[in-house]
Image (tube, rainbow, N blue to C red):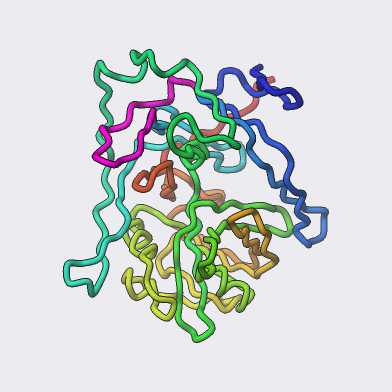
Amino acid sequence: AATSKNSGYPPAVDSSPIHMYCHLVDMIDLGVGGGKTMVLLGIDEVVMKKEILTLPPPAGDGGRSILALVDAAKMKPLAAMGHGKYATMSGVHLLLRPSQTQDKNGWESDPFVLKDVKYDDDDITTTSSIPDTVEWITSEPSPLGFNPLKAIVIPRPIGWISTYHPATVPHIAPYSFYIDVARGDTPMVAFSAFRPAGNSLKDAQLDVEETKCFGVSTVTQDLVEAMNLSSAPIERGESEFELAGLVAQAGTHVRAPLVQGAKVQLECEYVKTVDAGGFSVIIGKVVSSRVAKSVLTKDGAVDGNKLKPVTRLGYTDEYAVIDQCVEVSPSV
């Protein structure tokens, strides 16, 4: 077991390349029967082993001084797929954020490509200036030169959240801090929306809180470039569906659009919004789900090897396709 230098924390798994020591922020009542509660934790300390770090590219003039980057290809994280199944990612994919066309009248997306990962003799393992473990007390500046949290909590499922503007404009945008927070007879999901100081709330939060519902469509590789385009910063009165060339399919149980052709669709009723510092956590109850037959097993379960969902990794252009699922049974 690994322990924090600060007392009061339970031990972490020593063989894990990353340890996070946390404190309790809140126990959030999800407002449904059965005593369902979401636990919100604050991270106090992060310990990263050198083995999952890599040297950054040379900084340009005026660029930030970066000591090292967290390398997803070295970390090789597992994703929980439910029912005792886990999955790994097939490499790191790159996809830059959408850019405006030359005439400034539209937006375009680069292709989704597999990153060519190579490590030369100047790899971080031979760099003596970086210790074997890098420790970050989160109340202080990160010794890496940037906040590595998004590169540590990976792979993250993409919540492709769709809503209607009150004036019936269909909106959709990807949120990479998205998770299921309750299952059983009351399945629930949540996504986190950044709330910049002095600026207006995200369209998804505004729409959900006004219309009391939202949709979620799973991002797969055939839809990844459309998902990327839907993140373009367009005006509130414009539709990301139209921008990305998507067809808005009407929900059957809630008044929210869905992506026609998405292999998994969820329809959700709004439950509550929780303040989490500079973010809003929007929670919804899943009232309907649709799954394409093409991604099901013979027993009717979702087959991750067929679904191949696209997930987010650490930096602005890094993604992963989850497509190597295995079943793990606990040893007796």
Image quadrant in which the C terminus is located: top right
| Residue drawn at x 45%, y 73% as measured from the top left | 171
Q: Which residue is farthest front?
A: 62
Q: Residue 116, image x and y in percent? A: 25, 34
- Name the main secondary structure of what is drawn in magenta: loop
Above or below, 209 relative to 231 = below
Quarter of the picture holding the N terminus: top right
Q: Quadrant of residue 118?
A: top left
Closer to us: 116 or 145: 145
Q: Which residues are magenta?
A: 49-68
> Residue at (25%, 72%) from the top-left corner?
106
> For this rendering, which residue is in front, 68 or 272?
68
Q: Is residue 134 left or right of residue 329?
A: left
Which residue is pictured at 56% across the width and 77% down the height? 252
Residue 61 is one of the magenta-drawn residues: yes
Whether residue 51 appears in magenta in the rendering, the answer is: yes
Note whether 253 is above or below 50 in the view shown.
below
Left or right: 287, with 240 as reference point: right
Is residue 227 toward the left or the right of residue 179 in the image?
Answer: left
Residue 284 position (above or below residue 147): below
Relative image position of residue 131 (x, y in whole percent): 46, 16
x and y, in percent, of residue 205 in the image: 57, 68
Q: Residue 275 location, x and y as percent?
A: 67, 58
